[in-house]
Image (tube, rainbow, N blue to C red):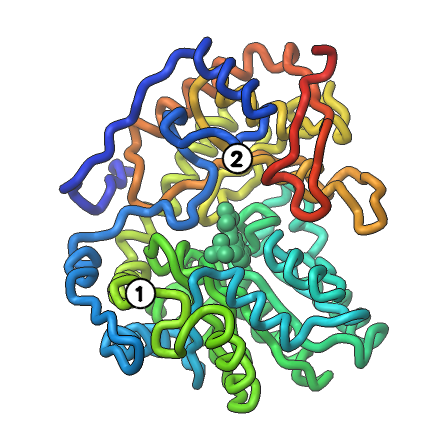
């Protein structure tokens, strides 16, 4: 196979400030070994998130200039709305400043004491918004989705038997059903069109509205095209439309698969719910023809939505992850397989088998990657999910380290460097120790908690 090169040229660059290992050891100690505390200037390759970190195209930047900043009725809003509705055929598009603002509005309607909301796996802000309303979030992904080595083609699928049992058991306390495409917290794994439609049918049979968290809808559609029988000859926009046609609404972070640096939306079909949502939008974000965004953001997203469904882009995008994973696997480093859409996930629990899950093996790997190579990654495991609502601490389903790949931002040689750092780390992994948490906030502790290496 020929090299699949980046299908773009670079017009504007951002220099990377080179640091030494000693500097980085001091910098990470200063921020109590929490990578969210680092200044981005002190990072060489920033794989903390793929959210808002993508490079915009020249056409998007041209759109920024065209943005109309009128308070009401801006043509930029209508271009944005049309671009969304071209892919996601919902009646009402409510623009927010990012995905979590859309979630906050949705759960101001559907949340509340004692309610139960199922998903394949709730992302942390989704869960945070649900729990802040007094409701409970439950994760019903298929068993294969929790096994890092399973090669199931759609490891983000909802477990339909468990969902049916859940809907019977919780009855009226379930206000809506959700599914997240791709399943970020479960390794960026896709959900099949068949599964989305089956979840929709189950929700309908129980009289529940069905919502899609569509952050990475284009990557999900690419996997459907590649892996789902009967989908290979269909266009990405057609597959995307089918995914959303069976839903009653969606939440979206436009910082992912809309190529935005900021933005999001809540979409709804029900006119009464849309009125309630817009009233909340006006109170918390802005007037409905801009919501949480400026006219220039709306323009950038309208163009981004046409670029993200390009097959040459998606082929390169997904191939990048597979390239990294193939090389890590060849060294014997355990990774989540098959490669996900937006990120490479290292199975840290398996790789550092000498570190107990309650000593955060993922955090240990993430800190070592920074000290050794200036690479910023993110623990997605017991540090993120281990604290239970009753205050106890349990190992998460998996201890993963996520290398999220910003869109169109780094080149293949950046990833070759990352692979070299992994090679070095593999040789010394047995010397890595676990961590303890010496301070944490009440909610979403991983952003601000303080760690201490064990034995230090
Ligand atoms: N849903 C999913 C599946 C997400 O991945 C995110 C954000 C959100 C909702 C919230 O969107 O950030 O625009 O408010 N994920 C980022 C990440 C932060 O790094 O995975 P937001």
Q: Is residue 93 above or below residue 335?
A: below
Label 2 crowd (10 A; few <14 / some 14-19 / many >=20): some
Residue 423, x across and y down, in percent: 48, 17
Mark 1 element type: loop
Residues 441 and 426: in front is 441
Residue 36, numbered label: 2
Sequence-wise, the earlier of marks 2 and 1 is 2
Q: Indicate left or right for 288 with 186 as reference.
A: left
- State yes or no: Cβ of the residue under disc 2 lies below 8 Å from any atom of ligand 1: no
Which residue was labeled with disc 1? 294
Q: Which residue is painted at 74% across and 60% down in the image?
A: 138
Q: Which residue is painted at 54% across and 36% down in the image?
A: 378
Q: Is residue 137 above or below residue 207?
A: above
Q: Indicate left or right for 77 with 189 as reference.
A: left
**Quarter the C terminus occupies:** top right
Q: Is residue 364 above or below residue 323?
A: above
- Displayed quadrant of residue 194: bottom right
Residues 212 and 157: in front is 212
- Displayed quadrant of residue 16: top left
**Quarter the N terminus occupies:** top left
Residue 97, numbered label: none
């Amino acid at each position: 196979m020929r090299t699949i090169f980046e299908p773009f040229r670079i017009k504007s660059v951002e220099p990377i400030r080179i640091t030494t290992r000693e500097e980085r050891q001091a910098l990470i100690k200063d921020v109590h070994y929490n990578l969210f505390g680092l200044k981005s200037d002190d990072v060489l390759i920033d794989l903390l998130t793929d959210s808002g970190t993508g490079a915009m195209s020249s056409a998007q930047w041209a759109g920024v200039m065209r943005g109309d900043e009128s308070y009401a009725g801006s043509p930029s809003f209508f271009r944005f709305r049309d671009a969304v509705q071209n892919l996601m055929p919902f009646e009402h598009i409510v623009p927010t400043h990012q995905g979590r603002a859309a979630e906050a509005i949705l759960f101001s309607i559907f949340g509340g004491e004692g309610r139960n909301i199922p998903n394949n796996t709730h992302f942390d802000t989704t869960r945070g918004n649900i729990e802040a309303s007094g409701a409970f979030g439950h994760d019903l992904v298929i068993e294969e989705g929790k096994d890092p080595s399973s090669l199931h083609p759609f490891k983000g699928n909802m477990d339909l038997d468990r969902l049916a049992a859940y809907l019977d058991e919780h009855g009226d306390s379930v206000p809506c059903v959700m599914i997240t495409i791709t399943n970020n917290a479960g390794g960026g794994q896709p959900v099949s069109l068949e599964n989305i439609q089956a979840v929709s049918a189950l929700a309908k049979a129980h009289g529940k509205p069905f919502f899609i968290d569509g952050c990475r809808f284009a990557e999900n559609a690419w996997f459907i095209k590649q892996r789902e029988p009967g989908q290979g000859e269909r266009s990405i926009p057609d597959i995307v439309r089918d995914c959303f046609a069976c839903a009653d609404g969606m939440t979206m972070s436009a910082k992912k698969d809309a190529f935005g640096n900021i933005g999001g939306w809540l979409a709804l079909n029900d006119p009464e719910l849309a009125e309630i949502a817009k009233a909340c939008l006006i109170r918390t974000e802005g007037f409905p023809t801009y919501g949480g965004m400026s006219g220039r953001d709306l323009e950038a997203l309208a163009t981004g939505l046409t670029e993200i469904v390009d097959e040459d882009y998606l082929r390169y995008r997904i191939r990048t992850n597979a390239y990294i994973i193939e090389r890590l696997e060849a060294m014997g480093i355990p990774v989540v397989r098959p490669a996900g859409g937006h990120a490479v996930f290292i199975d840290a629990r398996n790789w550092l088998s000498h570190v107990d899950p309650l000593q955060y093996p993922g955090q240990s790997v993430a800190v070592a990657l920074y000290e050794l190579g200036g690479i910023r990654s993110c623990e997605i495991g017991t540090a993120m999910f281990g604290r239970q609502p009753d205050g106890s601490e349990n190992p998460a389903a998996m201890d993963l380290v996520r290398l999220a790949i910003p869109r169109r931002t780094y080149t293949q040689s950046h990833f070759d460097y990352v692979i070299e750092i992994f090679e070095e780390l593999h040789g010394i992994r047995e010397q890595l120790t676990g961590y303890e948490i010496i301070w944490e906030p009440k909610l979403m502790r991983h952003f601000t908690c303080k760690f201490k290496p064990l034995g230090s």
